[in-house]
Image (tube, rainbow, N blue to C red):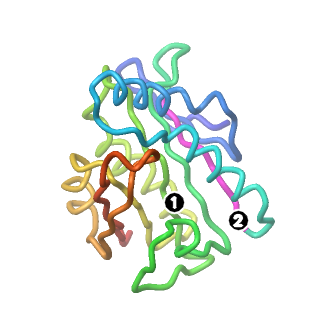
Amino acid sequence: MELLKKADNLEYYVEKGFSPKYLEPIAKNVLWKIRNKWDDYNEVSHCCRFIESIRESHDIWIETHFIKNGFKIVGVLFVTGGKVDLDRIFKVKLPCQFQDDKSITISYFHIVPEVRGIGEEWLRQIVIPYYKEIGIEEIFIKSSHLKAFSLYNRLGKEIEAYTTQSDNRLYSRKGKVFQIKI
């Protein structure tokens, strides 16, 4: 685990691999959605399946970026790289190619409500420079969080739109895939 930055009672870390403890911000988001009748898409379950699919491949690596406020994990995102098949990982046919040594994906980017509003700073000042320094040239992000679309458009460009059904087929979930050149 490497501390990348400390500011305003928040500590920004990166760690190779994955641990279930990092699911807390995602679980809090799922609880919020249940309480507010947002939709029935369980990101914790989907994230666990995603992580297992990554672990099964010896050609894909994963790193966890997270934010701590004291002992609480208040933000998380997972970065994958290596021999990533974007169509398989994102389950969307994309009009571009993933470059094994120059591209990464960001998945399951969640920040708990009490510190929301720091996502752009986290990406711009910490995550993107970290990967740019090791030679990464582009980032792919798939999201169905409508309020995040403007952030991803400021950082890059939309390359695909998609619609999926929620877990129990109660809601249509509109999403987009973005490409960020760094």
**What's the residue at 72%, 51% (across, down)?**
52
Quadrant including the C terminus: bottom left
Closer to us: mark 1 or mark 2? 2
Relative height, residue 23 to residue 122 (above, below)? above
Residue 156, picture quadrant: bottom left
Left or right: 136 as drawn, with respect to 160? right
Relative height, residue 173 to residue 15 (above, below)? below
Residue 58, picture quadrant: bottom right
Q: Residues within 10 Å of mark 1 (few under 14, many from 20)?
A: some
Q: What amino acid is labelled 1 in the image?
A: Tyr
What residue would you read off at disc 2? Answer: 60
Instruction: Say if the magenta span includes residue 87.
Output: no
Q: Earlier in the sequence, mark 1 or mark 2?
A: 2
Q: Are marks 1 and 2 in contact (CB under 8 Å)?
A: no
**Residue nearer the viewer, 54 or 68:** 54
- What is the x, y in percent for residue 119? 32, 41
Q: Secondary structure at mark 2?
A: strand
Residue 131 is marked as: 1
- What is the x, y in percent for residue 13? 55, 36
**What's the residue at 20%, 60% (across, down)?**
154
- What is the x, y in percent for residue 9? 40, 18
Q: Which residues are magenta?
A: 60-67
Q: Residues within 10 Å of mark 2 (few under 14, many from 20)?
A: some
Quadrant including the N terminus: top right
**What's the residue at 45%, 32% (across, down)?**
75
**What's the residue at 33%, 64% (across, down)?**
163
Q: What amino acid is labelled 2 in the image?
A: Ile
- What is the x, y in percent for residue 179? 36, 71
Instruction: Say if the magenta span includes residue 62.
Output: yes
Residue 36, picture quadrant: top left
**Residue nearer the viewer, 21 or 102:** 21
Left or right: 62 as drawn, with respect to 132? right
